[in-house]
Image (cartoon, helix red, strand yellow):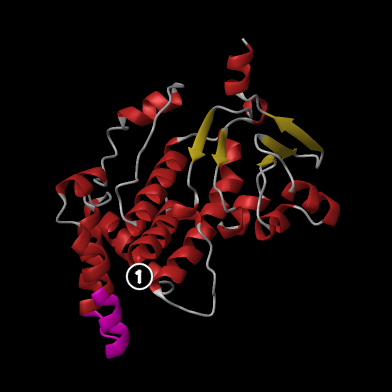
Amino acid sequence: MEKSLQETASYLIATCLGLEDPVDRVMYNVEKSFFHVNGDNPKSIVKLFKGLRKWYKEHKYHIKYQTNILRAIENRFLSLFPDPILERTLEYNDSEIPIWFQQWRAGKKIYLDLSMCNLYLKRLLSNAIFQMIRTLTPDLDLEDNCLQNIIVIDEAHQILEKVKNSVIRNYDNISKEQLEKIFDTLLREFGGKGLSFIIADQTPSDLFNCVTKLPSLKILFRLEDDCIKRFLSNIKEQEFLSRLKNRQALVIDGDGNRYVIETLDYNVKKKEE
């Protein structure tokens, strides 16, 4: 429970407010206070952030610091929640496991479409989904440590884009840095739960370092130089990858072996038939 509260505090503060330490520690203390008083989590995420706002109003800091945090809570978070659908989506209920999660665990294909959400809401919802999956999926015994479910993330840069200038400490960069820490942990731990990722993007050089380094199997189509260097250090291999033809891909497996695969051109095949 302690670990779960700490992780939840970190991703909420990062994705919702774009803030960092010590605000996440304060959120952790607010979560613990809810447990101490009510014996459970708050049912509404809005109530949780209002508890954070109340804490800062009761504990005075330097005026600039205080104003920045309270403004972030109002403008970056509470302004999102006049929407009853969004609030209902993030409502906490420990007695009901979502139907879609049960179906996915049973082997059904589930498609979650976040394309209509703005960037910050995508980060919040995707991390809430990951945290829920992680919490509700039991660890496997060593004997049963095999693949159970797959999570596919398309257009991964929408939520997994790395910081391009770490010197600048703005809302967007702080949010990305915290998300990278969280996602790195998820990639490392999900395997022990029988979960695997398929992560797809056209510009992998823009993604978190852990996204391109940790996966054991990589399928690379023709890429730009910046992207190629993320995967290959050998100059000849880099040149080879840059000259791949359409429908060809370079596969690098977990042992470092290289293979070239090619998909059929179904239009040509159809004409031949």
Q: SS class of the residue under badge 1?
A: helix
x then y, percent, for residue 170: 42, 76
Q: Which is nearer the eye, 4 or 259?
A: 259
x then y, percent, for residue 236: 85, 52
Which residue occupies 25% across, 81% down?
59
Query: Which residue is under mark 1?
Result: 26
x then y, percent, for residue 155: 48, 47
Q: Indicate yes or no whether the magenta region holds residue 66.
A: yes
Q: Which is nearer the eye, 195 or 261?
A: 261
Give the answer, above or below, for where 175 lies relative to 2: below
**Which of the 4 image quadrants contains residue 63?**
bottom left
Asked whether, in this view, residue 143 is left or right of residue 22, the answer is right
Q: Quadrant of the C terminus?
A: top right
Q: Is residue 234 visible?
A: no
Magenta span of residues? 58-71
Q: Indicate yes or no whether the magenta region holds residue 99.
A: no
Which residue occupies 42% across, 62% down?
10
Q: Is residue 241 visible?
A: yes
What secondary structure predominates along the stretch shown in magenta? Answer: helix
Asked whether, in this view, residue 260 is left or right of residue 180, the answer is right
At label 1, the amino acid type is: Val
Give the answer, above or below, for where 154 lies relative to 119: above
Give the answer, above or below, for where 52 lies relative to 255: below
Give the number of marks: 1
Which residue occupies 20% across, 44% down?
88
x then y, percent, for residue 12: 36, 59
Q: Residues within 10 Å of mark 1 (few under 14, many from 20)?
A: some
